[in-house]
Image (spheres, coloured by chain):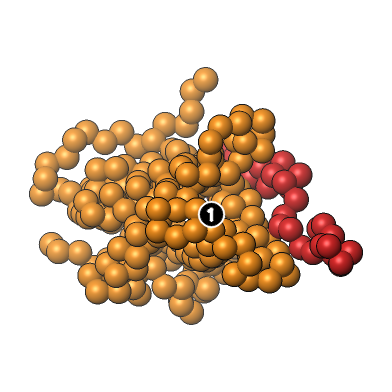
Amino acid sequence: MSRDVYGREVLQGMSWDLLGVFFGLGVALIVVHALYRWLAAPDRRAK
Amino acid sequence: MNAPSAPAIATPDRTDRIVRHAAVDRAIHWLTAACVLTLLATAFLPILGLEFAWVTVHWVTGWVMIAIVLVHIVRALFWQDLRAVWIGGRDVRDALAIVRSTLRLGGGAPAKPGKYSFAQKLIHAAFTLVILVAIGTGALIMVKIDTPWWDRNPYWLGDATWGVVYVLHDLAALSLVTMVMTHIYFAIRPEKRLFTRSMILGWITREEYREQHDPNRWQVDP
């Protein structure tokens, strides 16, 4: 957010501080899935 | 470190191959990937401190991306089977079966999918939504820069409307960071490498077809 010449709040866009959040979310999804597959996933190829 | 091994595939005879992705579709996929990576790099590297003249590369790549997406839409509408990637009731039942299997709630192994699994359809739908938002808002933002075809006009929309356009563009870009990371992760997982190979070389083997797909849901030439 910023303020225009009349002092009103104006939307500027997303905060780039969120870049780390979205990157971290990607890492978390990958780690959780990799751990699940490694430790707990049923073997779907089992006959 | 040894990764779990992927099924070893000797180069099969041509008659043993089933075309999963035609050359034009593979080209569309890899050109889109190159555009997305270029757009993310030119968007975020300057924010991370690597400063360079990114604007021209960004908007030119954006136009290339729009052209590729239009080609893909036309091809999907007139040359491909849209139903292959459409999420329907049966896919929802498949997803519930996968959840039951994952949580070991019984119900047996999930049914084999057609050409695309529920997860593949879901990521395709997510990329469709996010990329359409990114290029739609990106096309609007191009009004604010000088190009060989027009002079910039920052007053074309009101401040509040520009704010919404930027929020949507930025949110799409941030979402793409997470989505590209997970997409690449799944592409290199051992059990998914046959799909990555088919996106590079175009084919899967008949054995992989029988193993991975329901022939009633994805019918191929004998």
On the image, which quarter does residue B159 sit in?
A: bottom right
Answer with left or right where residue A20 lies relative to residue B132: right
What is the residue that sits farthest to the bottom in this orientation? Answer: B89
Instruction: Name which residue lies at 24% across and 48% down.
Output: B202
Decide: few, some or many residues near mark 1? Use Cα within 10 Å; few <14, some 14-19, many ≥20. Answer: some
- Is residue B182 in view from this perspective? no
Pick the residue in front: A12 or A44.
A12
- Above or below residue B113? Residue B179 is above
Answer with left or right where residue B206 lies relative to residue B89: left
- Above or below residue A18? Residue B124 is below
What is the residue that sits farthest to the top in this orientation? Answer: B1
Q: Position of residue B44 (x, y in %)?
A: 61, 40
Q: Position of residue B166 (x, y in %)?
A: 65, 60
Identified by mark 1, the residue type is Ile
Q: Total marks drawn?
A: 1
What is the residue that sits farthest to the right in this orientation? Answer: A7
Instruction: Name which residue lies at 49% across and 69% down.
Output: B94
Pick the residue in front: B194 or A9.
A9
Pick the residue in front: B163 or B74.
B163
Instruction: Name which residue lies at 60% across and 35% down.
Output: B45
Q: Position of residue B178 (x, y in %)?
A: 60, 48
Colour chosen for chain B = orange
Chain designation of label 1: B
Colour chosen for chain A = red
On the image, which quarter does residue B165 sit in?
A: bottom right
Quarter of the rendering occupied by the C terminus of chain B: bottom left
Secondary element at tag 1: loop
Please give the residue where the numbered disc 1 appears in the rendered image: B145
Instruction: Name which residue lies at 62% across and 62% down.
Output: B154
Pick the residue in front: B114 or B201.
B201
- Is residue B63 in view from this perspective? yes
